[in-house]
Amino acid sequence: MFKERMTLKEMIQKYPDEWLFIVDCEHSENTELLSGHVLVHSKSEADIHEASMHYNGSAAIRYTGGMREDVGYLF
């Protein structure tokens, strides 16, 4: 059903500077994403949010690039 399970490091290498919609996630005890199946990947964040609206289940959204200059961040 899904493509191969990948670690977060593999996802970052395969899909640089892209948004990922990740399902069947495996997390550490600290809830850090360890691995999963990339269901959708795109340069467009909107594409990922569109995919998430059609998925019923647990998933993660991750951007593989650095901090964007056109976005404000609150820590």
Image: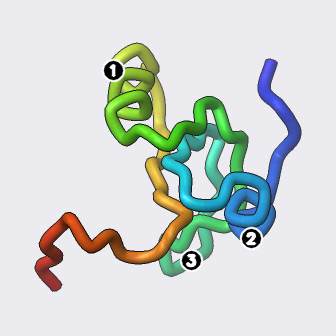
Residue 21 spot, x, y in % from top left: 52, 40
Amino acid marked by disc 3: Glu
Q: CA distance from mark 3 to mark 2?
A: 18 Å
Residue 69, image quadrant? bottom left
Q: In the image, what residue occupies the spot 56% across and 77% down?
A: 29
Amino acid marked by disc 2: Lys
Q: CA distance from mark 1 to mark 2?
A: 26 Å
Q: Mark 3 or mark 1: which comes first in sequence?
A: 3
Residue 23 spot, x, y in % from top left: 60, 38
**Is 54 displayed left or right of 74 in the figure?**
right
Q: In the image, what residue occupies the spot 32% across and 32% down?
A: 46
Q: Mark 3 or mark 2: which comes first in sequence?
A: 2
Q: In the image, what residue occupies the spot 58% across and 43% down?
A: 22
Judged by depth in the image, the label closer to the viewer, 3 or 1, is 1
Q: In the image, what residue occupies the spot 55% across and 63% down?
A: 64
Is there CB contact under 8 Å for labels 3 and 1? no
Q: Mark 1 or mark 2: which comes first in sequence?
A: 2
Quarter occupied by the N terminus: top right
Q: Which residue is mark 1?
A: 53
Q: Which mark is residue 67?
A: none
Q: Which residue is mark 2?
A: 9
